[in-house]
Image (cartoon, grey):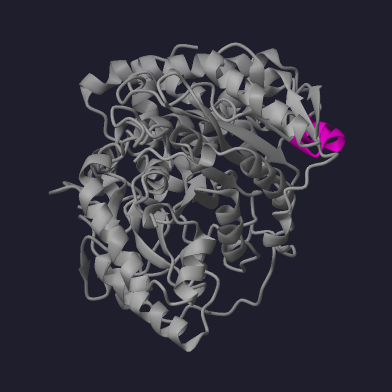
Amino acid sequence: MELSRLSLAHAADLLRKRSLSSVELTRFFLTRIEQKNPELNAYITVDEEGALAAAQAADARLARGDGTPLTGLPLAVKDLFCTHGLRTTCASKMLHTFCPPYESTVTRRLKEAGAVLLGKTNMDEFAMGSSNETSFFGPARNPWNPARTPGGSSGGSAVAVAAGLCLAAIGTDTGGSIRQPAAMTGITGLKPTYGRISRFGMIAFASSLDQAGPMTRSVADAALLLQSMAGHDPLDSTSIDAVVPSYAEALTAHVQGLRIGIPAEYFAEGLTDAVRDAVERAITTFRALGAQCIPLSLPSTPYAIPTYYVIAPAEASSNLARYDGVRFGYRCENPKDLQDMYARSRAEGFGAEVKRRIMLGTYVLSSGYYDAYYRKAQKVRRLIADDFQTALAQVDLLLTPTTPETAFLIGEKNNDPVRMYLSDIFTINVNLAGLPAISLPCGFDANSLPIGLQLIGRPLQESTLLTAGQAFQQATDWHLRSPV
Amino acid sequence: MSIDTRTVQNVARLARLQLSPEELDPCAEQLSRILTLMETLNGLPTEGVEPMSHAVDIRLPEREDQVCNGDQREALLACAPDTEQYHFRVPKIIE
């Protein structure tokens, strides 16, 4: 039995039967991390002591027969979720020694469901990036080819899942940061509806777009983690107060008669042939399973990137104003006065991409430019959301490629921000509209690099994504391929 | 649109970011390129469109104004770079 590839359900079953202990499973992953992390750089912090203590507690519960759904299962979380007393860096020098005095709702719920947190995964600094290269702790590397990026910003979580350095992981997605790295590492990544999962204790990047979600090796695993995290939280005023359905019940794989829209704009120029071919084969698979695939149009699609790169930096420049060297985080040496302390702490504490986005956001919000950029982008955001609403009135789901190309080389795009931004061209729209979407492995290119497809659903209809995703994974074995 | 180094300096001042003289030109050049990308939005007519500030239309929730997180003074001060007698300490502000 290959422990590194266990599904959550299978692992939970072994633990319940006591044919494997949580301590054994946790030690297995800690050893594997020790062996592979120096090369892959998936984890920023490994919490050996905390993980083993949680595993022991889990084994005690399991021995009493009162385990909860995730009891004893070793998971990884992006280093953007505040964990009480455990260093939380957001991959920034600004927070490289920060130990939060409180716990995020996501990690609290996972722990309450019994999960063992192995550690905190690498990411782009403050989640700003598409390749994990902006991390203060260096880039995470793609296990399919370590010269390549795993995508970003949840690159470390993607690598940890793909390389078997945890059973499953949690990421966050502001413009594609769960789905794009999932596609590039051959795993399953789900971004729920905005507001489905609490943002309390998630270090903010762009508050109207940020959303947490599972990164797993299967749709069934994603359903289980979503179940543990979803639901209203009074500590997040934007979390949606709606009933959380049983996601396990959505795993019927029944797609007979399901209407899937294929938006023409996602198959336009810029898409590589390998990705196009794989996604077209996936459409054929869905047709063979009984779904109807219907061509349609989302005309505002080309405007999503410029809209996002006004709105997200504007929100970021405001959110990151809190890093001033006073109450927490990095402070420069020997400040000569208060203004010098602010300006130098921020200049020294933030990396180049974060500074670029703060500058951009400050510019588009500054007097005289607000209407021309920010107001305009908010209007276009409405048009983009309206496009989706119209389309999703005619079909149950949309199917697109997740990314226009497979994993690119480390260093290939990091001197060209505009080119880097374009790698999120198929995922960003979904965040602007606040919709749920999932990325599923659907093939490989000639360099043996994974390809992902994206399914986009109606608000709060994660279940439809899971049903269709489960059907696809029962009909194909792309998600079972492993790099190591 | 291209922006000059004076504008960059002004934005950096607003953002409380110190930029070195060597950073100004590259920063102006990159911001100009990104702003050019943003200006493609001007090709889309938006008269009469209601600006969208949030992904979901939700009412702001209200609750009783009660302290619910207790006294965390020690824990919060422990995060600070410099403290003195239960205060955050900063460099001198007034001469």
Residue drawn where x is 43% and y is 71% of the image: A72
State the residue lying farthest toward the front: A1
From the top left corner, tell me how far across and down residue A207 is, in percent: 55, 47
Q: Is residue A126 left or right of residue A248?
A: left
**Residue A379 seen from this side:** no
Using residue A91 as the reference point, say whether residue A243 is left or right of it.
right
Q: Which corner quadrant of the image does residue A292 belong to?
A: top right
Q: At which x and y percent is residue A298?
A: 75, 24
Pinpoint residue A387: horizontal percent, then vertical percent: 77, 29
**Magenta highlight: main SS:** helix
Front in this rendered view, residue A92 or A188: A188
Residue that appears at 20% across and 52% down: B95
Magenta segment range?
A386-397
Identity of the residue drawn at 31% across and 46% down: A42
Quarter of the image for residue A360 reads top left
Residue nearest the observer in this picture, A203 or A119: A119
